[in-house]
Amino acid sequence: MDTQEAIQIISRGTTEIISVELLEKKLTKSAADKKPLVIKAGFDPTAPDIHLGHVVLLRKMKQFQDLGHRVVFLIGDFTAQVGDPTGRNELRKKMSPEDIERNARTYKEQVFKVLDSKKTEVVFNSHWFNRFSAQNLMELAAHSTVAQTLARADFKKRFETGAEISLLEFIYPLLQGYDSVHLKADVELGGSDQKFNLLMGRQVQEAYGQQPQVVVMTPLLEGLDGVQKMSKSLGNYIGINEPARDQFGKVMSVSDELMYR
């Protein structure tokens, strides 16, 4: 398959790619060098179920697998302890290490309903962040600014209303960005609500002397409430490991307007 055909497959069903030109260059070089690209997608183990919203992203990962690239399924067991406020007005509740470990274990069992187990590399970001020193963290923090983070819509709204913003929340995008540095990611996949964090990965990679990753964003799938995105923490999701009867009941509760999506 030539590069343009590959780009058509990758682009299908996405909301934005930053940038298509860089993706074309990476795919062309990959083919010439006969070396697969590193495709990264991160998942926070905040609940035991992977849901249909995740499947949108997992199917895009599977397309990269079918194109012969190296897919890294990153379980953010370390960053789950920080909490990602993206799209929220408050910090996600902190989880215990035991809950995170239990949920992460079920993730490994579920993702292979979509991904090829023989072609998927499952990694945990605690493997490198547990060895991260205070000096490493300060060096990482130097690559972003408070003004840059406060420009995010969710942070800006909370700042203007006087809601609390933890310093940990400023660090989260940097940690996600460093994941890309450690994995030497060529492409990172994520939902459209993750744009700031995904772009931070590009910024951090350049700061560490790497070529920036291509960002491929997929649309968010609305949850059973028909308003907010399907989310484990919001409880409006259909888990792919739920009994068939439960999945069917939940799907039938979705409104006619949302059924096509």
Image (spheres, rainbow, N blue to C red):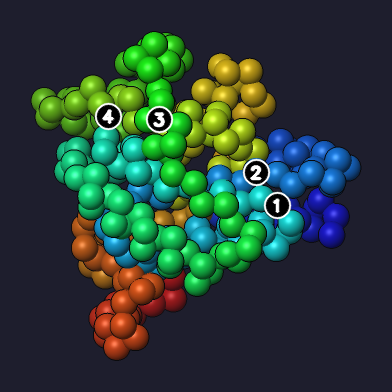
Q: Residue furthest right?
A: 32
Choose the circle earlier in sequence order: 2 or 4: 2
Question: Which corner quadrant holds the C terminus?
Answer: bottom left
Q: Nearer the viewer, mark 1 or mark 3?
A: 3
Q: Nearer the viewer, mark 1 or mark 4?
A: 1
Left or right: 211 as drawn, with respect to 217: right
In the image, 258 versus 176, the foreground residue is 176
Q: Nearer the viewer, mark 2 or mark 4?
A: 2
Q: Nearer the viewer, mark 2 or mark 3?
A: 3
Secondary structure of the residue carrying numbered label 1: loop
Left or right: 32 as drawn, with respect to 186: right
In the image, 208 versus 128, the foreground residue is 128
Query: Do the CB atoms of the residues marked 3 and 4 lie less than 8 Å apart?
Result: no
User: Can residue 138 be spotted in the picture?
Assistant: yes
Choose the circle earlier in sequence order: 1 or 4: 1
User: Which of the numbered marks, if any, corresponds to residue 94?
Assistant: none
Per the image, the residue denoted by label 3 is 129
Q: Gap between marks 1 and 3, in whole Å?
A: 26 Å
- The kind of residue on which mark 2 rests is Val
Residue 62 higher or lower than 177, as above or below: below
Choose the circle earlier in sequence order: 2 or 3: 2
Choose the circle earlier in sequence order: 3 or 4: 3
The x and y percentages for residue 156 are 26, 28
Q: Gap between marks 3 and 4, in whole Å?
A: 16 Å
User: Which of the numbered marks, if any, corresponds to residue 169?
Assistant: 4
Per the image, the residue denoted by label 2 is 38
